Image (tube, coloured by chain):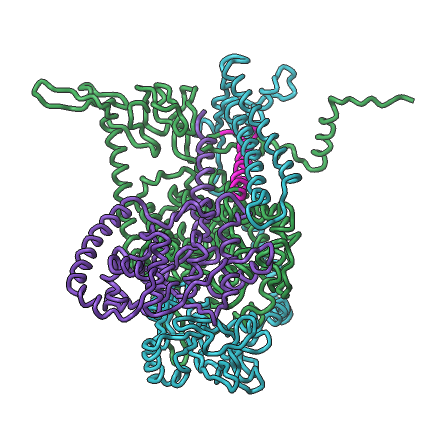
Amino acid sequence: MKRRKVDLQQAPVTAAKGVDERFQAATPLRALLNKVFPDHWSFLLGEIALFSFIILLLTGVFLTLFFDPSMKEVPYEGSYSALRGTMMSAAYESSLNLSFEVRGGLFMRQMHHWAALLFMASIVVHMARIFFTGAYRKPREANWAIGMILFLLGFLAGFTGYSLPDDGLSGTGLRIASAIMLSIPVVGTWLSASIFGGEFPGHLIIGRFYIAHVLLIPGGLLALISVHLGLVFKQKHTQWPGPMRTNTNVVGERMFPRYALKQGGFFMAVFGTVALMAGLFQINPIWLFGPYRASEVSSASQPDWYVMFMDGLVRLMPNWQIYIGDYSIPPLFWPAVVGLGALTTGPIFWPWIEARKTGDKRIHNLLERPRDNPERVGIGAMAFTFFIIATLSGGNDVIADKFHISLNAMTWAGRIGMIVLPPLAYFISVRICLGLQQHDREVLAHGVETGIIRRLPNGQFVEVHQPLGPVDDHGHPIPLEYGGWVVPKKMNRVGALAPAVKGFFFPVEKPAEAPVSPGMPPVSGDDREEITSGRK
Amino acid sequence: MTTLHDDATDASKAVDVNDPRLSRFDIVKEGLRRDEIEIITYESQFQGKNSKAEKRVVRNIAFLFFIAGLGALAFLGFYIWWPWRFELGETLSDFYTPLLGISLGISLFAVGFAILAWAKKLLPHEVSIQARHDGGSPSDEQKITGQTMMFVADELGNGVQRRPLLKGAIGFGLAPIGLVAAAPLIGGLIENPHKDELPIMYTTGFNPGKNGGNPVRLTREDGSPIRPEDVSTGGQMTVFPGIPHGATNEYADSPTLLIHLRADDAQATRDAAEADRRNKGSMWGDYVAYSKICTHAGCPASLYEQQTNRLLCPCHQSQFLITRNAQPIFGPATRRLPMLPLGVDDEGFFVATSDFKDTVGPDFWERP
Amino acid sequence: MTSDTPAGRRLRVFSRRRGAPSKARRRLGAAVRMVAALALAGGVYTAFAPGAFADEPRQLSATAQEGKQLYDNSCISCHGRDGQGVDDRGPSLIGVGSASVEFQVGTGRMPMTRQEAQAEEKKPQFDKNQTKQLGQYVQELGGGPELPAGELYEDVKENPEAIARGGELFRVNCTSCHSFTGAGGALSSGKFAPALHDATPETIYAAMLTGPQNMPVFGDNQLTPDEKREIITYIKVQLQEDRDPGGIFNLGGYGPSTEGIAIFLVGITILVFTSLWIAGKS
């Protein structure tokens, strides 16, 4: 009998062949390994949201193992002495127990909550990056819309999660949610009664929110995040203009190994940040809030930060009630239902609105520097100013208290600020953009200011400029064309001086490689056609 | 960059991957060519092998991994051995969560930065360019797919058009099935808010109907009844209906604020109440009771300022003036807080002589 | 307030008091007002002194005599002779009791430096003994609530239920203004409910008893002395002394507002710097 010889070296090859015979994976796998991604710090902001979502799933599954979404009244008998003997819902009791009786449970709960705040914060920051660089333009309008829906779903996930512990603060939030439903014309009372199963608070709402929070909304998030990433993959990432970068290519590094390693490392950094915050900063100390009682409330009752803009709008709304015969529309309806609806769905249509306004039907894979589109920056600044004022107004009682400002004055400041400041922000940001544009053009036309002052024979003083390109017969620089990317404006950016601090934000430049991006290493080839006009 | 594109797809540049003379990198490059990628720069970050700089980077990365391991071990150590059960006062267990967070945070950060440093500092520098195709599929593909879809539509549509019976049958058959899917969801969830004999939207626990037709006593949160002298002058007390479960969330619209006003404030309040159709006769002596549930969004409007006689709601800062029938004077609330008609029974305890005469709680469309 | 209280060791993100410039301004204002008050007091004294001594109706105890001296120097300009009150300036002190003095003077709220929406807590101008003397004087002017003798809080080891009952009462009666964490809160038009982190049992007890400024009164019929002690036990043991189990920093206990600030200032900031480093050229 001949012993079969096992060639260990050939084993992986055989296995791989076996897999490929069944799945024909070789070609797509190679394409994946080779896929090129552009590299820029601002492209990593969306990843923070993705990674915090993964952390949310991991910690959330842990929490479900101990949480009991029931509103049955039970006496508390746990180790937190200041509530012992208090009657409370089973949901609140199990939230306390998973904080105090489960080893490491409180840490998990705090990670979950911080990850939720980080998820929403990074969505907003990521969205701002997309907006101000025009990354949503054709062909990526759909992904922008999906992103807005993700924000709305995150908002709902956050609110339902905030409600689940059934503590004093979350019950107050639920009360307001019920009032918002009640404020809807015609169907308000029916809607509230249907969702709460009768009169507020009833016995069903925690169970219903629970299934929404752990299954329906995360399911939606997961599905949409997959589509969102799939589209990024299919359409390939946008890139900044720069040397060699055109609308029809992607300049960067291959997915494996460098890009994937960076992603893995960044995931660990996000995870580490959440863990550090969960350890260092107390979040939502539910044991101090007590069980929800309709008669109890705390000053500074606020929702989590991403709901605060809605709460702020509700606070700023004047007391205008509309009466229609025997019926009426309460003022709560406008900011909380119409306002929230408009603010979360309106921006979805922005890419199409802009395209229609500019008549731009071209495909854009190159980003625009914010300064090159002052109009867009102005509108974005306006929207964000509005959002920030609304959010600050959501905490205006805390601001009033801690900075010794009259509460009533804060409300009025918010009301007036909401109308006056956004147009002001528009105007200022447009002016800034135009100024920056002009400075770029100036440098391209005349060269970099050297700081050297020369006195001419006639007594006149002039500053010596270092031309960025060739000069004409008189020694004057030939004006260069703007290429959509950073123009060097300091002598050390063109290699005259060593930078004062060795590069953290900015690389140490080598001479003769002037206008390259911080994320773009110098090019060795010399036959490349450059689309910027830095130096020809 | 058309040159690059041509370059990458140019079949003449293809190599025979079975050629034994090719290095592995040559084969990789062939793969890149097929994926329309060109490597522009690919160079080591260090000069020469085993350079000083390289060694330093390797040392740093190793150190980071070492820290990561230490942090993870510390996490496990804290997790297992640190006292974790909650105890009152300043105890070691207060540091359980912080220690877990710090050790895990450091560990994960170190892993992250080790991996990042590896990718950033150790791997060769690389710039690659990949061609991008967008702007739709080739026009013949578009046409073929379009025609295929039209063909499918024809197959189905013509069939239906030629067979009108089918058309009706489909309509009749499918529409109800769609409704069947929606029915249990809507039918199960829907609740008529006005179905009860004492409609929930307009009735609180103070309704005599909840107490067999007798006036309902005002009680504290523990159910004990209240005598007038129990509330201090310039003081307030949260009161609940004196019925079973009256102080629980079952009667979430019933919490009421019983206020004992100072004589001059009480006079002003009485004057205002007497002049009002609904609140007439609702005060008892210098005592007045207002619903605690804000008419704006339902939070307890319970921040009682005893000098300025205002009630402030902490949720949206509506302010109500007690001496003027709790009329809103600031903030988004439009409606005053309903006043509870007060009386004192034979035993000297406060009762509500009737339910609130206004609807309690947040406003809604059909409120009378 | 004072660093010798246990609560003084607690980490806090914001301080209730404002920064240096306003403090300086306040000091300056205080000095100006002090001079004005002294001048006024002197004027009042010369105008009324003979008469004041002539028709002194009450026999004051020795302590109260000392208190009267202090009163006539520092309080009379606003609260008037014999605590009768001055219109638009200071209320009458007849019947407010020594508990009021304990709260107002003991926490430095009185004497006030200027007319504001609300008297602010500051460094007390009178020591404990002087406060007692003033309190005795006001007590003898027209009676009123007094602090009881003995401990004002329970020993949680002997009476473990006190803290839970106190917590319940705290949430029913106190949190709507002072917040769940005792961080205080805003009231209408510049008034506020102060934070309880540094409040002593005497201060809290006196405040409940007398209802200073806009705080409602919680007399002994409403919250029995035992219940008051339970509330103080909860504030002292749970809110002041107990460390939060969930972290090193409690972000001031202001709820989601400061949590929202933290996620941007710490979380997003760390990660943006990390991504700058990741994509930066090495």
In the rendered image, which quarter contains the C terminus of chain B? bottom left
A143 over C72 or under it: above or below: above
Would you say residue C40 sits in the magenta stretch? no
Question: What residue do we see at 47% from left, 63% from top?
Answer: A297
**In the picture, which quadrant includes the N terminus of chain B?**
top left
- Indicate left or right for C130 with B42 as reference: left
Is residue A447 visible to us here? yes
Q: For this view, does B69 lie left or right of residue C13?
A: right
Q: Residue at x 72, y 27 (%)?
A: A12
- Residue that protrudes farthest toward the right in the picture: A1
Chain A: give its colour.
green
Q: Where does residue A436 sit, x and y in percent of width and height?
A: 27, 37
In the rendered picture, chain B carries what hue?
cyan
In the rendered image, residue C136, in percent from the top left (x then y), is placed at 36, 62
- Can the viewer see residue B158 in this picture? no
Q: Colour of chain C?
A: purple
Percent x, y of residue C102? 38, 59
Q: Is residue A264 magenta?
A: yes
Please identify the dominant SS of the magenta region: helix
Residue B248 placement: quadrant: bottom right
Viewer-side residue, C195 vs A279? C195
Left or right of residue C114, residue C101 in this image: right
Whole-percent x and y of residue C256? 46, 53
In depth, the one of A445 and C138 nearer the eye is C138
Q: How many marks?
A: 0
- The boundaries of the magenta stretch are A253-279
In the image, what residue occupies the spot 32% across and 77% down? B264
Q: Nearer the viewer, residue B126 or A209?
A: A209
